Image: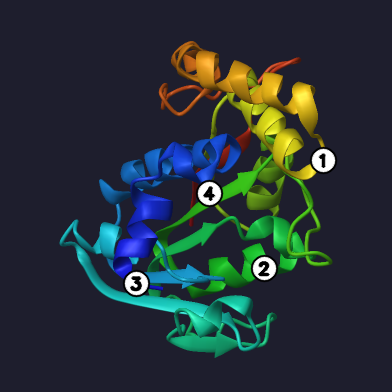
Amino acid sequence: MTQEQINKIYIQPTLKLGYGYYLIQKSLIEAVTDLRTKIGGNVLDLGCGVMPYKVFLQESGRITQYTGIDLEYSEYHNKVKPDLFWDGFTIPLPDNSQDWIIATEFLEHYFDTNHILKEMHRVLKPGGSIFFSVPFIYTLHEVPHDHHRFTPFALTKYFENAGFSSSEIYPRGGFNYSLLVMMSLWAKQAGSKGFIRLLVKFFMFCFHRTLIKNDHKYSTYQKGYTDFQNHTMPSGLWGYAHK
């Protein structure tokens, strides 16, 4: 996969990806843009896939080493090779060696959350941090390795149990994002066709800008929003955990 292709999908997503995938990538790059203002030193990209944000983050000028780690048998490796392979259990890096760990769309695929967070904690330097993102509204994917849909409260507890001193968790889009993602997935993958499918696509075409604009209360547009309450509906979550 070329850097130009990565940019079109992950860095500057457009509606050509489809409404659902566009919104997912849009919320992710907003979160990663926040990360770029903070990241530096030795960086581990765990479950790195095609390492879509590597170049974007390196543009900060503060990263001294960027290491991508993934399983040896991954569908992504015919596109981008990781720097290191791992066995899915032990991260092949020394204790206290990394300033940052990136785990984008990773934690939902790891069954034993307690174990992997403790392993991340082990390789982080004192004061080091994890940047993470997880879906909340999305189809089963990479089956059968799709194990979790986390709430912010569960993630907070997992981080505490793994020994992290603090964490911040933010929503990636609210009700409007979730509605558009679900409508897009339904139109694309639920076997819908004919007039109803056209009507759904027409609705998204006419109103997606307004829906996104009015989604501010529970979205990445308000980076300080952490007050998750009953009846909120994030499309995904992102944030930081600190050793």
Determine the CA span between mark 1 and mark 4: 43 Å
Q: With respect to residue 116, does 27 lie above or below?
A: above
Residue 26: image location, x then y, percent: 44, 39
Which residue is tagged 3?
2
Determine the CA span between mark 3 and mark 2: 30 Å
Using the image as rendered, state which of residue 81 and residue 95 is in the foreground: 81
**Marks 3 and 4 close (CB-CB < 8 Å):** no
Q: Which mark is residue 165?
A: 4
Q: Which type of secondary structure does the marked residue at label 1 adopt?
A: loop
In the rendered structure, which disc, 1 or 2, sits on the residue that comes first in sequence? 2
In the rendered structure, which disc, 3 or 2, sits on the residue that comes first in sequence? 3
* Three-letter residue code for mark 3: Thr
Which residue is tagged 1?
190
Q: Which type of secondary structure does the marked residue at label 2 adopt?
A: helix
In the rendered structure, which disc, 1 or 4, sits on the residue that comes first in sequence? 4
In this rendering, which labeled residue sits more in front, label 1 or label 2?
1
In the rendered structure, which disc, 3 or 1, sits on the residue that comes first in sequence? 3
Determine the CA span between mark 3 and mark 4: 38 Å
Q: Is residue 106 left or right of residue 12?
A: right
The quarter in which the N terminus is drawn is: bottom left
Residue 40: image location, x then y, percent: 26, 61
Which residue occupies 40% across, 60% down?
128
Which residue is tagged 2?
116
